[in-house]
Amino acid sequence: MTSDHVSVSDATQAAAVAHRAVSQRPHTDRAAWLEALADALDAHSSELVALADDETHLGEARLTGELARTSAQLRMFADVVREGSFLEAAVDHPDPNATPPIPDLRRMLVSLGPVAVFAASNFPFAFSVLGGDTASALAAGSTVVVKAHEGHPELSRRVASLAHTALQTEGAPDGTFTMVEGRETGVDLVRDPKIRAVGFTGSVSGGRFLFDVATQRPEPIPFYAEMGSINPVVVTPGAAAHALGEVADGLVGSFTLGVGQFCTKPGVTFAPAEAGLAAALGERVDLQPKALLNDRIGAGYRHRLNEITDLDGVEVVRGSEPSEDSHAAPVVLRTTAVRVLEQPEDLLDEVFGPAALVVDYSSLDELRQALAVLPGTLTATLHAAPEEEALAAELLDVLGRVAGRVLYGGWPTGVAVSHAQHHGGPYPSTTSVHTSVGTTAIRRWMRPVAYQTTPDALLPLPLQEANPLGIPRRVDGVLRPPSS
Amino acid sequence: MTSDHVSVSDATQAAAVAHRAVSQRPHTDRAAWLEALADALDAHSSELVALADDETHLGEARLTGELARTSAQLRMFADVVREGSFLEAAVDHPDPNATPPIPDLRRMLVSLGPVAVFAASNFPFAFSVLGGDTASALAAGSTVVVKAHEGHPELSRRVASLAHTALQTEGAPDGTFTMVEGRETGVDLVRDPKIRAVGFTGSVSGGRFLFDVATQRPEPIPFYAEMGSINPVVVTPGAAAHALGEVADGLVGSFTLGVGQFCTKPGVTFAPAEAGLAAALGERVDLQPKALLNDRIGAGYRHRLNEITDLDGVEVVRGSEPSEDSHAAPVVLRTTAVRVLEQPEDLLDEVFGPAALVVDYSSLDELRQALAVLPGTLTATLHAAPEEEALAAELLDVLGRVAGRVLYGGWPTGVAVSHAQHHGGPYPSTTSVHTSVGTTAIRRWMRPVAYQTTPDALLPLPLQEANPLGIPRRVDGVLRPPSS
């Protein structure tokens, strides 16, 4: 049965049955499943990259790297499963003298149940069929129904087919992973009573619509959406004075990467007016048009670009709107901090595509006022000179209030997959406080259960007194790594 | 200014200003604030218990214990703050060979901002002004606006006044804690843009109404509601054969505790038909009426009791509806598993007050079918005989799917405050996967921030390379307790 013929109800029914089977097995079984998925991607890298390039125009180099990142992510979650901290196992031995008395209590996280994952268009591997949401959900012990993205249907089908084979070979229950297709399936999937949580990567309008569906169900479910983000950059007077060329080089590289179709694209940069950053960017951009992901993205980009350039006080420094066949050259826009304060919601809104807005400020007070109206964002980046330590501390504090990742120097595109990573920020960049990249992404799919005065033999393995799996646990309040 | 004159907007404005000040200070300062609050409660125990008894009729013994539990909870969070694990600090050193390369990344949790706490009526200390929500939020670094419960206004004002004095004496910023009053203030508080999360304890109807307000804001915020729960108990054939008297004694004690006004009251018990559990309960209940919390609770109890006793196949084994002045004697109801399967939504719904429903099952298959339609619940309790190990394993698995805490033997009333505790379950018992009791309750008020390539001196103390606070951290993926 190919995925374009799988109905939502068949997929969720299979996922529910499989979830019971998965729950009966040692959690460590899942590590081998994740590694088999990683191996399948790597073994078919050339074929998959070629399919992806046909459907997304993102280029072989970028796609090869993205596939490698995606298989590495699957392997990282295999390690997370084996290490066992993600279970957050805690054991409290009885304490009759506590207020109130403490009985034998043992707590761990278990999976929420079957979950839905909405694939994104702009990362056809890393945020698609076997991307971070699927990898973390499988690691958690959830079963997964992926809603394929219409932007790369053939790639999605091929990856799903490889996934089925890999999971079957490793002995995962049928229904552990299923893919469904069709724009109209999305709402049905979010409303399906068997689905217990949703991961989504896409636009604010699409994400908010489905968030509302999820929260207005008779039984609301968590809806983890990663949506739009302006990823502000602040260039201090010191950085502008000492390193304007370097900043301009880096910013052009970052905002045009992947034809500006990264959720972490630095969209709005605050710079001293006298530095002329917008002009410096204009001199550096390569006006050769490149293919956007698809015509839908092209139309959205054109619409939003027209919207922002129609605003008073927004100057097009260089570039033009995308062609009818959705090829786009970079666009550099310029405005002032005073204008931002007058119309923050229109100016500080994502432009998905290769456009960058420079906001000139004429004093630090103007900068402070403008930063106070920043919306929630995935990332925020500060470029400061070493001697501006007090100013840098102040600005990092301000940026940390609105962003999930704060960079000192460097550029936000390129999201490392690691333990200390976080990809998520205040609304509208995400709908929850959780991350969709990095090891803690697994927690989104889990809920705690505490067992009280339960005989050892009836407890799940991670909670048995002897700690047979050797996982880290908190015992009577003290964190104990596996070795102790 | 007394709390009945504080407006929502004044309170949230003060909380927002205070939150900036709190964020600038070492997180360990908060431990002393929490201890000062605990000391204030303990120092005024007799006075506060007398006030509480006047307003709630819960009795001196119970209220004295509840106050001690509440101050112990504040002290526990002081310990949690000092220990530092709650920050979930993680440090990844650069790894240029990773796919993609890992820059220096350091992640920790920070507070979400000012939060709102809705006090409950049934625990005038433990789930009220300085209860678990307030304690965990202050520990997290949030500032708190408490909406007082109308059921105990004088007690609430006195506790708030003691809290103000204690916090001021310890040097906490003004606005760290504020109480507002008035039923109509609730919606304004949840809608206030400065409020970043809400904790609520109360009914399903009230909780769901405010959950919808919170999730439908322009910027949705987390709404952690602990609502209704039937807390099912399963008595196996073995337990009924060997220990029916003991089970009946324990169940009567638990469902009548606090005049049946515990969120963890065991409301529905499945027992073998031939055991006659309902009759055994009827013989044991003390029909002396006791005062319910207030007339509103009395009216709600009467309404719901009439609703359930009007259903076909529900027998009143013993007891009667509450008096007009809201005094209630225990009520024992009986129905069958067959009836539950016919009308699960009406029969498996909370009765808030001293009523217990016994569901007689005539075979294990009937029991299994009935358990399959259980709604989400805070707790589920199994009473089995030692020789029924396979059945017990099966039933624990089933109960663990719908409950946040699973008990083998014992009774669910009385919620220990400890590291392995969890108080929360699938909807409608709570609106989220998080807990409102135990140390991990703190995580509800926090969000992650990752710092990338940030100079050591500009990092928050918990993330600096030397780990100056000596807190547990995950370094390059390896969990390191403070000693190592």
Image (cartoon, coloured by chain):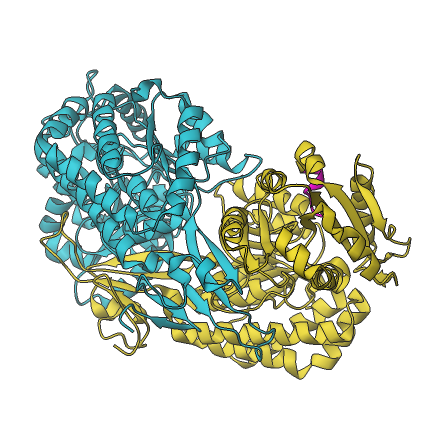
Chain colours: A cyan, B yellow
Query: Is residue B52 visible to the viewer in this orientation of the structure?
Result: yes
Between B104 and B229, the residue placed more toward the observer is B229
Between A476 and A350, the residue placed more toward the observer is A476
Tell me what residue is drawn at x 40 percent, y 46 percent.
Answer: A23
- Which quadrant does the N terminus of chain A fall into? top left
In the picture, measured across the screen, residue B336 lies left or right of residue A264, that is: right
Tell me what residue is drawn at x 39 percent, y 41 percent.
Answer: A21
- Residue B234, given in percent of the width and then of the height, sits at 63, 51
Count every numbered label the image shows and give the total: 0
Residue B482, picture quadrant: bottom left
Residue B79 lies in the magenta stretch: no
Q: Is residue B123 above or below residue B73?
A: above
- Residue A96, given in percent of the width and then of the height, sits at 57, 77
Give the extent of the magenta segment: B345-350
Q: Is residue A422 above or below residue B338?
A: below
Query: Is residue A232 visible to the viewer in this orientation of the structure?
Result: no
Q: Is residue A127 above or below residue A459?
A: above
- Which quadrant does the C terminus of chain A fall into? bottom left
Q: Residue furthest top?
A: A324
In the picture, measured across the screen, residue B123 lies left or right of residue A216, that is: right
In the picture, measured across the screen, residue B355 lies left or right of residue B209, that is: right
Q: Is residue B90 above or below residue A344?
A: below
Tell me what residue is drawn at x 13 percent, y 57 percent.
Answer: B95
- Residue A189, given in percent of the width and then of the height, sits at 44, 29
Between B372 and B207, the residue placed more toward the observer is B372
Residue A470, picture quadrant: bottom left
- Residue B117, given in percent of the width and then of the height, sits at 59, 58
In the picture, measured across the screen, residue B195 lies left or right of residue A444, that is: right
